[in-house]
């Protein structure tokens, strides 16, 4: 049974617990365009159980559909834990609690869906994973409304969708946004996670479609790994903060058999990749992969060593506040004398922030692109 439609004030949606500032918004023109293009299809479904939302950043798509069409039971997948918390908070403030439910990116999320709304991911591998899952498990009459800002779209996205659907066409542009609308699912199998053996490290690396750098060794991580022998020689508990594929955690485990390692990331895809990398290398008993915002599940003054390659984007926006929050979290969990090893793009100049938030900081590596610093918590 459908409920009475209500008006949703998109301007009142919040990004919290993500960074919030006047120039950062919880909804944009692409969210509104997706909802407008899909309005007839959303109005025609029998229940919110027929609707799936993927990549909803802060809840605008799921809550917009629930409010405007009186739907309940909409299934939602957000890779970021921040997105899940933001959706929950926005649903509560909008009087839409209980109208949507969060699920992993699996067959259960997609099964029988007739309308799927997607904020297009940047990574083609992530889009391929989503498209193949929809084609494999959604209803035969499913229509996929996937959109984003034009500057982030590429012709290759059409090709990815065409591999899973017989019909793919673009909408008219509006406010620098556009949709790719797909229907007619082909007979395809779900995408498999990628896996590769890295000869230079002697380790396996595993990655899902949305994992940063995929099943490779990115150059920033390489700079950090070269310095593992110098890191906190007496350490017994370490943290890989923002673990991605888990390659840093696995490298630590390989070089330091005495270490237990917590590998933390906000991304469900990254946490799954980290766990798979740990398992593939025989370190599952020493690496604990957990999905967390920062290190909220780690006790203060409990860790000897933290390794970090901090993000400097929130969505498409460069923002230094993200790194500062992670520096502060690292300082909180480190014991006196504990070390934070950070690798970052040299132009970002984080040394002052590290000195202020963690403690005395010295440069331990540098090349034309990346800098590695070690910061020590005062005794």
Image: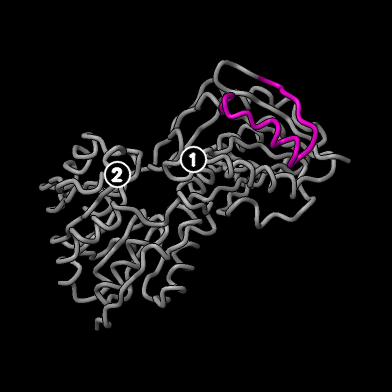
The secondary element bearing badge 2 is classed as strand
Marker count (numbered)? 2
The magenta stretch spans which residues?
345-365
The secondary element bearing badge 1 is classed as strand
Q: Residue at x 27, y 58 (%)?
A: 32
Residue corresponding to mark 2: 149
Left or right side of 334 for 73? left
Q: Is residue 133 magenta?
A: no
Depth check, front residue: 85 or 6: 6
Residue corresponding to mark 1: 313
Say which quadrant the C terminus sits in.
top right
- Above or below 130: residue 310: above
- What is the quadrant of residue 102 in the picture? bottom left
Left or right side of 217 for 335? right
User: From mark 1 to mark 2, how far is it between C-alphas?
Assistant: 16 Å
Left or right side of 39 for 111? right
Depth check, front residue: 69 or 235: 69
Q: Are marks 1 and 2 in contact (CB under 8 Å)?
A: no
Identify the image's colour scheme: rainbow, by chain, secondary structure or one colour. one colour
């Amino acid at each position: 049974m459908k409920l009475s439609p209500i008006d949703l004030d998109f301007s009142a949606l919040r990004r919290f617990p993500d960074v919030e500032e006047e120039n950062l918004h919880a909804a944009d023109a692409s969210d509104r365009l997706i909802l407008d293009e899909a309005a007839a299809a959303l109005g025609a479904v029998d229940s919110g159980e027929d609707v799936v939302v993927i990549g909803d950043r802060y809840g605008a798509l799921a809550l917009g559909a629930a409010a405007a069409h009186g739907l309940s039971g909409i299934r939602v997948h957000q890779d970021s834990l921040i997105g899940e918390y933001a959706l929950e908070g926005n649903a509560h403030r909008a009087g839409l609690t209980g109208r949507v439910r969060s699920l992993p990116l699996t067959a259960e999320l997609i099964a029988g869906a007739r309308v799927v709304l997607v904020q297009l991911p940047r990574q083609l591998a992530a889009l391929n994973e989503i498209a193949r899952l929809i084609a494999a498990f959604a209803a035969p009459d499913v229509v996929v409304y996937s959109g984003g800002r034009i500057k982030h779209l590429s012709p290759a996205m059409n090709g990815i969708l065409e591999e899973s659907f017989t019909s793919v066409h673009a909408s008219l542009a509006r406010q620098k946004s556009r949709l790719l609308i797909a229907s007619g699912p082909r007979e395809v199998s779900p995408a498999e996670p990628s896996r590769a053996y890295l000869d230079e490290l002697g380790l396996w690396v595993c990655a899902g479609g949305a994992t940063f750098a995929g099943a490779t060794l990115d150059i920033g991580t390489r700079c950090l790994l070269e310095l593992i022998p110098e890191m906190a020689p007496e350490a017994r508990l370490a943290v890989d903060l923002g673990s991605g594929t888990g390659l840093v955690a696995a490298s630590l485990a390989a070089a330091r058999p005495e270490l237990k390692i917590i590998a933390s990331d906000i991304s469900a895809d990254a946490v799954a990749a980290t766990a798979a990398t740990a398992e593939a290398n025989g370190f599952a008993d020493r690496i604990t992969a957990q999905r967390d915002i920062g290190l909220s599940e780690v006790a203060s003054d409990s860790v000897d060593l933290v390794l970090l390659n901090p993000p400097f984007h929130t969505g498409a926006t460069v923002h230094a506040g993200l790194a500062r929050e992670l520096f502060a979290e690292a300082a909180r969990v480190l014991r006196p004398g504990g070390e934070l090893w950070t690798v970052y793009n040299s132009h970002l100049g984080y040394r002052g922030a590290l000195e202020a938030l963690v403690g005395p900081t010295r440069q331990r590596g540098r090349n034309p692109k990346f800098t590695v610093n070690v910061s020590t918590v005062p005794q």
